[in-house]
């Protein structure tokens, strides 16, 4: 069935769009990314572990830095009171 649609002053013939039905059990349903998923999962986990270790190391360094800053502040207060 062809419909007519008015565009400006002219009438344009339009054809209704067909519904695309995809069977979920069809091979290759998720497209080209489906070939890469087996390699993306370990890569994602490796990046998560790397950044977790990086954050842990940064927090340990920051903890030590705060301890040194507190000790240095105590030494400055002691030196001022002396």
Image (cartoon, grey):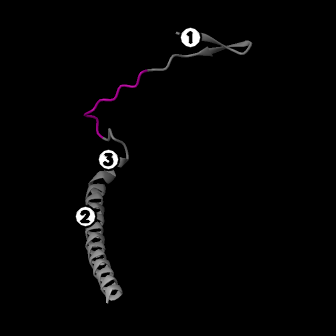
Provide residue 45's location: percent of width, then percent of height. 25, 59
The residue under the point 30% across, 73% down is 62
The residue tagged with tag 2: helix, strand or loop?
A: helix
The span from disc 1 to disc 3 (Cα, nearest Å) is 38 Å
The residue under the point 32% across, 82% down is 77
- Which of discs 1 and 3 lies nearer the camera? The answer is 3
Q: Nearer the viewer, residue 34 or 44?
A: 44
As displayed, is residue 43 above or below residue 25? below
- Which of discs 2 and 1 lies nearer the camera? The answer is 2
Query: Quick one: label 2, few (<14), some, or many (20+) residues within 10 Å?
Result: few
Q: Nearer the viewer, residue 60 or 49?
A: 60
Please name the residue that numbered disc 1 is placed on: 2
Please name the residue that numbered disc 2 is placed on: 49
Q: Earlier in the sequence, mark 2 or mark 1?
A: 1
Q: For residue 32: magenta?
A: no
| Quadrant of the image occupied by residue 75 | bottom left
């Amino acid at each position: 069935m062809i419909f007519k649609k008015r565009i400006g002053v002219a009438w344009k013939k339009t054809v209704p769009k067909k519904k695309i039905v995809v069977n979920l059990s069809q091979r290759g349903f998720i497209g080209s990314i489906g070939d890469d998923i087996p390699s993306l999962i370990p890569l994602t986990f490796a990046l998560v572990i790397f950044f977790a270790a990086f954050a842990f190391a940064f927090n340990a360094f920051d903890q030590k830095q705060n301890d040194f800053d507190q000790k240095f502040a105590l030494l400055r207060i002691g030196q001022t009171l002396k």
